[in-house]
Image (spheres, coloured by chain):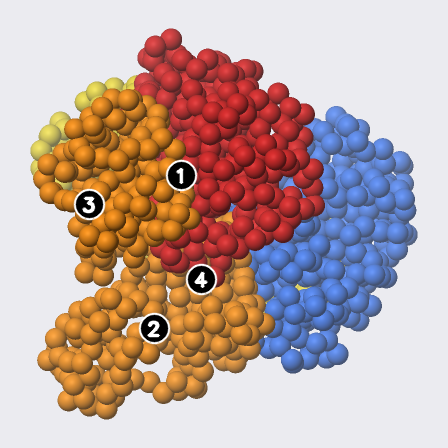
Chain colours: A orange, B yellow, C red, D blue
Amino acid sequence: MKLHEYQSKFRFAEYGIPIPQGQTATTANQAFTIAEEISGPVVVKAQVLAGGRGKAGGVKLARDPEEAKKHATAILGMNIKGLIVKKVLVDPAVEIETEIYLGVTIDRTARRAVMIASSAGGIAIEEVAAQTPEKIIRIHIDPHLGLLNYQARNIASEIGLPRNLWKQFVQIAGALYKCYEDSDASMTEINPLVVINGDQLLALDGKMTLDDNALFRHPRLAEMRDTDEEAPAETLARQSDLNYVKLDGEIGCMVNGAGLAMATMDMTKLFGGSPANFLDIGGGAKSDKVAAALRIILADPNVKSVLFNIFGGITRCDEVARGILSALNEVHTSVPMVARLVGTNDEEGRAILAQANMITATTLAEAAQKSVEAARSTSEK
Amino acid sequence: MKLHEYQSKFRFAEYGIPIPQGQTATTANQAFTIAEEISGPVVVKAQVLAGGRGKAGGVKLARDPEEAKKHATAILGMNIKGLIVKKVLVDPAVEIETEIYLGVTIDRTARRAVMIASSAGGIAIEEVAAQTPEKIIRIHIDPHLGLLNYQARNIASEIGLPRNLWKQFVQIAGALYKCYEDSDASMTEINPLVVINGDQLLALDGKMTLDDNALFRHPRLAEMRDTDEEAPAETLARQSDLNYVKLDGEIGCMVNGAGLAMATMDMTKLFGGSPANFLDIGGGAKSDKVAAALRIILADPNVKSVLFNIFGGITRCDEVARGILSALNEVHTSVPMVARLVGTNDEEGRAILAQANMITATTLAEAAQKSVEAARSTSEK
Amino acid sequence: MSILVNKDTRLIVQGITGREGAFHTEQAIAYGTNIVGGVTPGKGGEWVGKIPVFDTVKTAVEATEANCSVIYVPASYTSDAILEAADAGIPLIVAITEGVPVLDMIKVRVILEQKGIRLVGPNCPGLLTPQEAKVGIMPGHIAMPGNIGVVSRSGTLTYEVVYALTTHGMGQTTCVGIGGDPIIGTGFIDVLAMFEDDPVTEKIVMIGEIGGTDEEEAARFIAETMTKPIVAFIAGRTAPPNKRMGHAGAIIEGTTGTADSKIKALEQVGVKVAQHPEQIPELLAGL
Amino acid sequence: MSILVNKDTRLIVQGITGREGAFHTEQAIAYGTNIVGGVTPGKGGEWVGKIPVFDTVKTAVEATEANCSVIYVPASYTSDAILEAADAGIPLIVAITEGVPVLDMIKVRVILEQKGIRLVGPNCPGLLTPQEAKVGIMPGHIAMPGNIGVVSRSGTLTYEVVYALTTHGMGQTTCVGIGGDPIIGTGFIDVLAMFEDDPVTEKIVMIGEIGGTDEEEAARFIAETMTKPIVAFIAGRTAPPNKRMGHAGAIIEGTTGTADSKIKALEQVGVKVAQHPEQIPELLAGL
């Protein structure tokens, strides 16, 4: 789960990291009022969970409240990579002297958290990594000790930070790691961390991604989820405890197991089609869950055929079949469907599906092939 | 530094450990009011940093406020092992079904914290260790993980705690360790942890000893120090950054270094005397500190002679000599003094002391012997 | 022969009285696995069928001399359960539970490494040595004894592959599901090394997926160390970047973790990479 | 020959610009110790006399190839300083600082053990190999080269003993102050084993005090392993229980840590225990 810039920065501030004293607005008039209070130039920033908002025109400098209002009017409602901007952050503008990158993420290979820093802040760290990898400093963090002060000093030294800023930097780096750990984050970054007035550090922009598996112990963070920013189908899927990711192909896939779901998606491609989604119903799904999954698939207008691939273990094929039927009783559709059920109670499952008008297959390859053909015939209609 | 029972228990409560809902009183009338509010039998408990207050009559059951007042009157002002009771804790009385011991301390050999538990609660753990060592369970705690739930369950299982109490016990044991760690304690114990109403655990009595070296990061705990409970000389010494412990012999000792101070004490004994104190002036002491130290020694009426043993390294013998003279200018005394100064600036030191009427010695043995003789002649006067 | 588990495995089940634990215990017993005890705090002294339940792993190990534990407790209790098993001296711990927080696993791994204890999982289907031991949730009937070693980050995809092998008469030494999380106990390299050392295993199937760089590291290890032939399959060629594909570990971050990178790395060191799971038996037969 | 430090020791001083650090650096240089650098964060590039100052231990080690560090930073920064030296690859760290919280040291020790790094102290006078290296605050002039190894939990009491030895013409291989805290890096046993292995050391003086059970454990080790003759002294026979005698570690808790218990344990394994420090040369001469 991703946090907005303002959510991340407000959380940073709880850990003592200095941030600009801005506020969020959902209307242009609010933006005007905030800019008035700040009394000075402000930056109006789209709060949207997509990269590249700057290039899309989602970040604008305003010299006065009137201009802030004008920019907010333009930005609110803007569509950035498919997401509608519903909120802006109005921050006091500052004169930036230096831009630093500072982030924490997991190094899967080293199996530790790693603090990443660079004197080349203000641009995506991936770009720095590609263009000037020597400018990236990485320090692994002992999970039992946290970031130690000397480690932060080593970073400050290696990115060439002026010595008068070290104390602040050590405090900010320590706070950032603590915030990361306390939040069970998988990524958190300040980019840029800027130097202003010659001797002050300020976290100008912030990002956090949280470990979904750990949200159970962070109810306050879990509440920050912005469902406006999810595809509605993904919200629906999450509520039914389904793993669903919308893609832009035409073959709806319903599979038990994440690896098998990916393999199934891949096979539609292999046989000339393209998957409309990733959907894992998990292990031991009951019929109501299966029905919810099918409703989500069929709600996607791009879907031209549906492929059920169930390898029954804990999951019972008859339960899956019942769920499919129950959804079909509700949603009337002419989309052709291909079912491949193998394993626990597969015969019962197939018997149940015999009531529906469904293409069947024995192997996964056969099923994938038939779903591609079915999608093609739908498109041609 | 030791905390009082009420200080320890109130701190336990901050960590979610259930304690009796009592309050402290410094007057008998206050005790009456608290007992009235509790409305039911209460226990009036002397708050004093000495063991054995029960046997000394410092803990009394009262059936009603009137009786609570009577007991408080008796207990307040009571002298328990040299300490005057200035405060009582008035706790609601409970019917105790089982008494458990639960504590955390440092196992120096294992170099870890250890949780100690016993089904034989309510008596000093040292007694249990001596009489029924098999009733003591010890679990070492990984400093980086803290007490894990399974470890608390292992303890619950091994002390034979009924299963319906395990959840509470796991929570209390975890909280006790957390409280220990967060406070930089060297010892913390609940004794007894009692079962009441068949299904509730309650911390009836509590103790904490804090690591003096870590008080700098616990200002709130450092403020809890009860100087009423220290020998006034020890308070004075602490304020001058001196390590002083009052003993009951007749030879006052002033030494630089803790080990050497102990060795010096031991030698007075070896030659037939007995030390009046442990006093380490530390490394590099200036004359004002030395003067403060001598004032403290001379304030003890038991002191019949004083032995200065200074092995100059960082400590300069001339500084020590100047401090001694400055104190003697202030406090007029007829107590004989033996000085042995070796090392940095020892000749200058001896020259300064030549102004005072002082016995000198070259070796430590000679110094100790002379101080014993001097004390004897003072006593005979 | 086999790796990790066999007839001599003395298994305990942590979370044996839970829904999952009870169901899979029954299945494992039916398969012939030597389950010697179960653990559920507060239920010591009870029985699940013929299996005694203990309050703690410590008491279970004392009573049963268990040498392996399988964990079915909820995600929020899993790290405690793993450390409990480790502390009680269990040398092989298999954690089935899905949804364990990553930072928990980072901490747990450090401790297990210090103690030299092997963890498989979490978020894995477990281990299956056909006709000897079923430790976890892999369906037993799809497997048969033989000389193919199978190692996989996935669950049902593994079953699909094992089923295809069995259908083609290719039996397995041991099937190892290492799990789909970003931080797991046992990785490809560990299992490949064990298969290399197992005299019965002749060929190896390795099933990877997008996310992380474990497959790339395995490729380096294969080039340096492995002599037995390997067929691989990598799931997720059609997965988009920065989206988690079910498994917490299956996510393409920036430019790392793509299926293409993994396939390329494996092919470069001589591993045959299948286009789809059902192609694996055919490729194995050609080696 | 000697143990731990000698002419080849390349020493850095953490906290070199502080009052204590600067003073003892001067003393150590005057003694002939090979100090190659100092560390004070924020003062990199400055000089203390002829010694270059670095911002971090890492940069200091890179520039100087230091193999030993002595720490004079305040107590609240000491654990960070120790871990910084360890992380920078310094194999021998000597922490002079007094007053380090016990729980800090418990955590630090675990890490040092994992890395196999030796710590002496904290709250110790350091190491002195006469006419070769002075790492810490022991006065150099009281010592002279010879074949007695000295190990002690104390500071000035050690000087007293070394002074007595020198006065009696008994030189020392190395004098080791292990420190007076409850949790220290290097204990009696470690140092005894080093003296046993050092070909030049012929006899050993061991100075203990009340608190803990290190002397008792040393006695067991002596019985099992040591062949060289040992004279001991234990301070604190007249110390009362439950009172801290200056050193955080010098406290008799309950019935453990008494001088009598330590003296008895040592005498039982054949160690001569002196009645007072000045008796030590005489006892050594008799061995």
Q: Which mark is residue A365?
A: 1
Residue situated in front as seen by the camera: C185 or D121: C185
Disc 2 residue type?
A: Gly
Disc 1 residue type?
A: Ala
Residue A150 sits in which quadrant? bottom right
Question: Which chain is home to disc 4?
Answer: C
Q: Which residue is mark 2?
A: A52
On the same chain, marks 3 and 4? The answer is no
Q: Position of residue B288 (x, y in %)?
A: 55, 68
On the same chain, marks 3 and 2? The answer is yes
**Closer to viewer: mark 1 or mark 2:** 1
**Closer to viewer: mark 3 or mark 2:** 3
Q: Which residue is mark 3?
A: A335
Real-space CA distance between mark 2 and mark 4, rounded to the nearest whole angstrom: 14 Å
- Residue contact between numbered discs 3 and 4, judged by CB atoms under 8 Å: no
| Element class at badge 2 | loop
- Relative to A366, does residue D15 appear above or below in the rendering? below
Disc 4 residue type?
A: Gly
